[in-house]
Amino acid sequence: MSGIALVTPFVDTDADQLSFALGHPAREALAVRDLTVDGIDVQLRLLGASHQVFAGPVGETVACLPGVEDGLPDTLARGFDDWDYRFEARVHRFTAKEFSAEVARVRCLADGPRALYGIFPGSPEAITALTVEREDAGLSWRTWHTYPRSRRIVATRTSLEAR
């Protein structure tokens, strides 16, 4: 599956505007991919400059959320029912050449049956990408939010494991 050209007004956002929330209700999505990974229903959602993942008991939102000003945690661990949830986020800054190469790499990673990525107006390097994989005791997903003007990429990794 190749990237989806997203139809949305151009909004100049950056990595430091992202917030994190668990249990946030579904927001209006620009694109959605429903999957079942090893018996677990997963929904990948592209939002305007952000994402949501619903998997098992977890609803994860990384977005520019009104009223949520805490930003992204470096790491967060929580228990949900019989599941262990772990979230990690990193912000990487690149030179122009490195940024283009990294965006191309991410697009390749997100061009598969368990992935979704969208290309935002304004730059072919302005993307949000999500991938999900089966793990021994559950699943994991990775996301990337790219910001061409600042040449920064927010990369997250989440695991959801049965206890």
Image (spheres, rainbow, N blue to C red):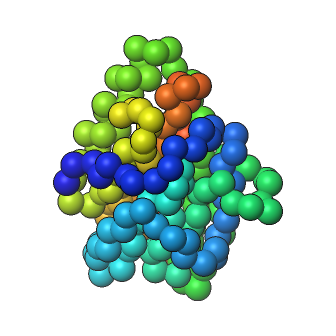
* Residue in the image at 39% along x and 72% along y: 43
The residue lying toward the viewer, choosing from 116 and 74, is 116
- 29 on left or right of 63: left
Residue 17: name its quadrant: top right
Where is the N terminus found, in terms of image quarters?
A: bottom left
Depth check: give the residue in front, 159 or 48: 48
In the figure, is residue 143 to the left or right of 74? Answer: left
Image spot of residue 28 (x, y percent): 51, 71
The answer to which image quadrant residue 60 occupies is bottom right
The location of residue 24, given as percent across then percent down, is 64, 74
In the image, is residue 125 above or below residue 134? above
**Residue shown at 42%/18% (left/top)?**
98
Q: Specify whether residue 66 is in view.
A: yes
Image point (40%, 14%), residue name: 97
Q: Residue pushed farthest bottom?
A: 81
| x and y, in percent, of residue 111 in the image | 23, 48
Residue 148 position (above or below residue 11): above
Q: Left or right: 48 with respect to 75?
A: left
The answer to whether residue 135 is visible is: no
Residue pictured at 45% horizontal, 35% vertical: 122
Instruction: Please provide percent x and percent y for residue 107.
Output: 30, 40
Give the camera-side residue of 101 and 88.
101
**Where 93 falls versus 87 (above or below)?**
above
Between 109 and 13, which is closer to the camera in this rendering? 13
Residue most toward the front? 9
